[in-house]
Image (cartoon, rainbow, N blue to C red):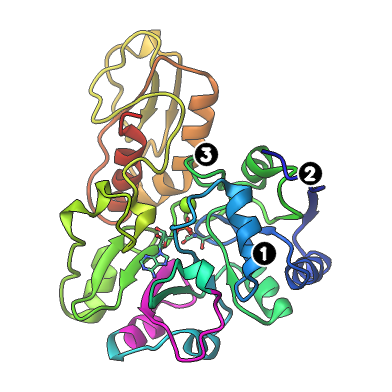
Amino acid sequence: MKTGRKTLILPAGQAAAEAAAHSLAAGGLVAFPTETVYGLGADASNATAIAHLYAAKGRPSFNPLIAHVAELAAARRIGRFDWRATRLAQAFWPGPLTLVVPKADACPVADLATAGLDTVAIRIPAHPVAQAILRAFGGAVVAPSANISGHVSPTLACHVESDLSGRIDLIVDGGPVEVGVESTIVGCFEAPMLLRPGGLPRERIEAVLGEPLARPPADLESDESQPLAPGMLASHYAPRANVRLKADHVAPGEALLAFGPEIPPGIEAAAAVMNLSPTGDLDEAAANLFGYLRELDARAPRAIAVMEVPEEGLGEAINDRLRRAAVAR
Ligand code: TXA
Ligand code: MG
């Protein structure tokens, strides 16, 4: 489905920030870099623009969006922050953290963007290009990852272009993103809950809260009608190729997504090999994850075999995305 829009691509800078702000104010769809992944922005108060955004992504409309703002004062106009939410906001914003809080009384975010929930997801991104666009625009911007629904998130402007060219108005190219996986989402409920592991490691959040984060109900991931965090739909980050996890060898014709210095048997007959981090650095691995999945997938291998990644720091988010990529479709 092309919407027949002409997609302009501009290098990041003052002119691009102003063009982005203009386009957003006119109901346009603008892709821009954040430190986690590229987002596809629309004016959070404009239901028509948000409807176009869902259409451009081919996203199920029950999936609520994150409202992005430049500073805490703006966040407080959207949601209600209890002491825990305030602590987390002060410790980690701007940064790769999204907080789900109760909506404020005069919440400017359109109901379509919150999928009718009485909570709202809010984030203050740190990326200077995102900050410049949010400040130039002035209002809140809803921004899911700038990919076709079901594809892996974009970490380069060319990923956005290949998914969304002809469907959106503007792509602001700010080069590769730093973190590489989406923000960590914490639900600020009675017991604070890790709704999605992401670019901010759980350990750092728990250290600030002084208590462990609760886990979401176990049936959440497979139940598509549950709107608590429907972005957690089991198969959400999907390459076309099948993904085989915890691979300790490569079968002929498979592509290998390696991690660390070890070389598994069978590598001579691999269709392609990429290493997330030859030294075993999890931050580097997160930054490379989605780009490497796209590149390996483009070779149309028999399957993508992925070596084991430790479940600590950003490894929790990496393994979460890999498990979703591996769900049989
Ligand atoms: O890093 C990121 O978070 C990126 C950049 C662009 O900011 N954005 C992103 O958005 O990943 P998206 O739409 O792909 O994921 C948003 C997630 C979804 O899992 C959605 O279900 C969840 O946030 N979400 C939004 N509002 C929610 C709410 N009120 N309660 C629970 N989950 C919510
Ligand atoms: Mg997404």
Q: Earlier in the sequence, mark 3 or mark 1?
A: 1
> Is 294 placed left or right of 270 in the picture?
right
Residue 313 appears in view: yes
Q: Identify residue type, mark 3.
A: Gly
In which quarter of the view is residue 235 placed?
Answer: top left
Badge 1 vs badge 2, beta-carbon distance below 8 Å: no
**Residue at mark 3: C-beta within 8 A of ligand 2:** no
Query: Which of these two is toward me, 81 or 265?
Result: 81
Reading the image, the residue beneath label 2 is: 4
Q: Determine crowd level at label 1: few under 14, some 14-19, many 20+ residues with C-alpha closer than 10 A.
A: many
Coordinates of residue 117 in the picture (x, y in percent): 39, 72
In which quarter of the view is residue 243 placed?
Answer: top left
From what the image shows, is residue 178 above or below residue 249? below
Q: Residue at 34%, 61% (x, y): give it.
A: 227
Q: Secondary structure at mark 3?
A: helix
Q: How many marks?
A: 3
Q: CA distance from mark 1 to mark 2?
A: 15 Å
- Over which residues does the magenta segment extend? 85-110
**Residue at mark 1: C-beta within 8 A of ligand 1:** no
Q: Secondary structure at mark 2?
A: loop
Reading the image, the residue beneath label 1 is: 49
Q: Identify residue type, mark 1.
A: Ala
Q: Determine crowd level at label 3: few under 14, some 14-19, many 20+ residues with C-alpha closer than 10 A.
A: many
Q: Earlier in the sequence, mark 3 or mark 2?
A: 2
Q: Residue at 68%, 80% (x, y): give it.
A: 135
Q: Identify residue type, mark 2.
A: Gly
Reading the image, the residue beneath label 3 is: 291
Asked if residue 91 is among those painted magenta in the image, a careful observer would answer yes
